[in-house]
Amino acid sequence: MAKLRGQERARYVSRMFGRISRRYDLLNTVMTGGRHYAWRQLAADAATASNLSGAALDVACGTGDFAFDLARKSNIEHVVGLDFVPPMLALAIGKARRQRLSAQTVFIAGDAHSLPFADDSFVCATVGFGVRNFIDVPRALSEMARVVQPGGRVVVLEIVRMEGRGLHNRLLPWCFQRTAPLLGAVLAGDSEAYSYLPQSVDEFLSASQLADVMGSAGLRNVRRRSLGLGMVAALVGEVA
């Protein structure tokens, strides 16, 4: 796939996720060996580990799993899940009903770069495996910081570009680039979508670079934790 920029990339990503929406959860489980459940729980714990109570926001919510983890926290009154892919939102709404979380969650269509919320609306904001798809990462992270109350947290869970030239740091991305399209073809019937995945990681930031962007977005005390043999990072920043 040729490199796409701006709105052209946004339209491509929206169509792609719409195509794979019904197989999205299955592929996540297979490609992470089921570890994505624990990673999201860890990130949800970090997002809600404060004295604040109120509403939470999950940006690029996909099929809703991160939002559901947040909704089960005792200090979270309700969760807003926002995404720009209608088929993903439809699946999230159905899952909320089946998990009896419809009263605690609401899912809406929206743009991460221009969040339709007032300042200080939430006690935390999260994004799981969605930052790589943003057109303007600094702007989107600044928007997340804007809508979170002082003392609240912004948490990012993402596949990141590995740093260093050691064998481990070269071998894992090489394997990812070859296995993801194959799994996509076999399990989702869409090798193109899962060729985009490793390409998007290769073009993305490292964990340390992403932490720097979060700091520039106005977040303080940014800290990160390496997961998935270094290919995944959980980053937490506090709103001043």
Image (cartoon, rainbow, N blue to C red):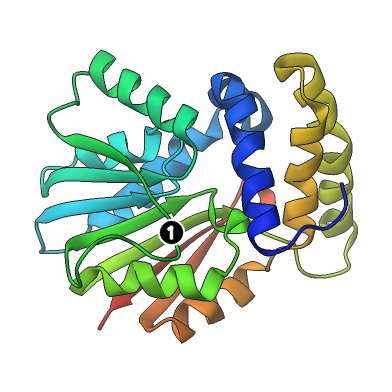
57 vs 90: above or below: below
Question: Which residue is more in the foreground, 123 or 34?
Answer: 123
Q: Is residue 51 left or right of residue 14?
A: left
Percent position of residue 167, x then y:
90, 57
Residue drawn 56% across the image and 26% down it: 21
Residue 208, horizontal then vertical, whole percent? 61, 75
Q: Is residue 108 left or right of residue 18?
A: left
Could you tell me if residue 29 is visible in this image? no
Asked where in the image residue 210 lies, by quadrant, the reply is bottom right
Disc 1: CA contacts within 10 A as few (<14), some (14-19) or many (>=20)? many
Residue beneath the point at 19% across and 19% down? 100
Left of 71 or right of it: where is 193? right
User: What kind of residue is marked 1?
Assistant: Ala
Which residue is more in the foreground, 230 or 53? 53
What x and y, as percent, mark residue 233? 56, 57
Q: On the rendered structure, is 166 left or right of 230? A: right
| 24 vs 209, nearest the viewer | 24
Query: Does the rendering let one see residue 181?
Result: yes
Above or below 18: residue 223: below
Q: Quadrant of residue 61?
A: top left
Q: How many marks?
A: 1
Name the spot of residue 194 as percent of width and height, x first.
76, 35
Give the labeled residue for mark 1.
112
- Element carrying mark 1: loop
Q: Quadrant of the C terminus?
A: bottom left
